[in-house]
Image (cartoon, grey):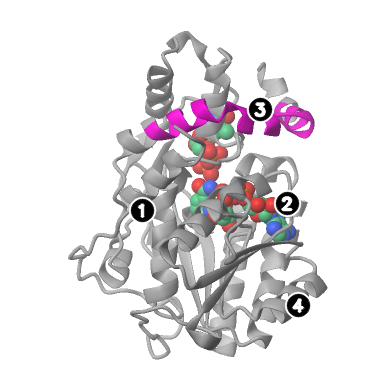
Amino acid sequence: MGLFDTVSKLFISGGRFLGLGFARKAQLFTLGGKMGKLLGQSSSGENGVATILVTGGCGFIGSNYVRLVLQQEPNTRVINFDALTYAGNAANLKDCEANPNYRLVVGDIGDRAAVEKVFAEESPNEVVHFAAESHVDRSILDSSPFIRTNVQGTQVMLDVSRVHNIERYVQVSTDEVYGSLGDTGFFTEETPLAPNSPYAASKAASDLLVRSYVHTHRFPAIITRCSNNYGPFQFPEKLIPLFISNLQSDLAVPVYGDGLQVRDWIHVVDHCQGIHAALRKGKVGMVYNLGGLCEKTNMELTKTLIHLLGKPETLIRHVADRPGHDRRYAIDCSLAEKELGWRPTTIFEDGLRETVEWYRENRAWADEIKSGAYRQYYQAQYGHRGM
Ligand code: NAD
Ligand code: TYD
């Protein structure tokens, strides 16, 4: 199977489900519903053609989103604005380069002049903001880039989007802004923000900035908060691609602490469908939680990966825990089901098997990333943990 066949296949499996939802009273995150406008179809710029400015489209989720939009909407132009940090890889969208509806602009969201330039050149009418520093462990080693990109960069995106009268803006956020759960319960959109890592705090700060622009400037933003993603093109610093990569080389996998922390796993294509549904159908001023309805402990997940790769469990190493490690995330996404007609559709066992297959078939992609700077990071993160 070729490089992108599996990805295309996963896109086909990621359809929409018009579920019944639950009649839970939704809490608007700001405007009491007065400003909310339910869009049943795409907004469009001049000549009926929508131009979406996607930030961070060379990263894991952004690249899957760009591909999905280009495949689903032949009349939508996608401008990908990405700084190509360590996590950004233009090759993630190699298959889209020849598409006349796609353009990559290399630039930093913290650089207002560069952001203004791309807005002036392309006149986007919608923005989907993915660009961020995204790894909790890196935020523990050094939080500065997180404040700069996630907070100040978001401020630039909001200011320039506002000046250009953007019709719709989606802030791609995370369930980590809610903090940690005990053994029971779920995060709803009404759960108070209680971020525990510098990464989560920087995302919560950017969410609050978005909220303030909606409230103060009537800015047409929507926030999505999603659980842990898995799938093709994820940088091998996050649990699933890191463990696959180590196991492929018969290296041990570093499980933090007792490994009984729980994450809710969602396939990246399901997440992208949810973001797009929020862009096109969400009410301005709302937060939508997106999740995979799939809670697993890290140990369960690790053993499943070991099994899928045919390796021995002796490769599991319990190492020093992550400081401040959140114990459990679980998402109630019934609001998104009710208002966006969205719910995740990928069956975890299928999605994970196909993901492992993708990394098997694309070892060169990961090997290229795992050179120089990656090795330094690995040493800083895992050296003192005996890895
Ligand atoms: P990623 O680290 O794989 O990609 C981030 C992308 O942003 C890269 O292409 C990088 O080059 C770009 N970028 C970083 N700083 C930039 C800057 N200053 N200017 C322009 N571009 C910049 O991240 P991801 O996992 O794809 O996450 C994307 C978004 O989704 C983030 O906002 C993240 O908080 C959110 N999110 C991620 C998950 C997850 O499980 N990965 C879950 C929920 C939400
Ligand atoms: P990660 O993929 O970093 O996502 P997040 O911290 O945003 O949830 O980690 C997922 C879980 O796996 C989390 O509980 C931390 C744990 N983990 C390990 O046990 N070892 C590792 O080497 C990594 C990267 C994560």
Residue that mark 1 sits on: 331
Residue that mark 4 sits on: 116
Specify the amino acid type for callout 1. Answer: Ile
Q: Which mark is residue 84?
A: 2
Upstream in the sequence, badge 1 or badge 4? Answer: 4
Residue that mark 3 sits on: 367
Upstream in the sequence, badge 3 or badge 1? Answer: 1
When asked about the image quadrant of residue 157, the answer is bottom right
Give yes or no for residue 370 being in the magenta stretch: yes
What crowding class fits label 1: few (fewer than 14 Cα within 10 Å), some (14-19), or many (20 or more)? Answer: many
Q: What segment is highlighted magenta in the picture? A: 354-378
Q: Position of residue 17 (x, y in %)?
A: 24, 60
Rendered position, 118 above or below 377: below
Q: Is mark 3 within 8 Å of ligand 1?
A: no
Find numbered disc 1 in the image and state the secondary structure of the residue it sits on. Answer: loop
Q: CA distance from mark 1 to mark 4?
A: 36 Å
Specify the amino acid type for callout 4. Answer: Glu
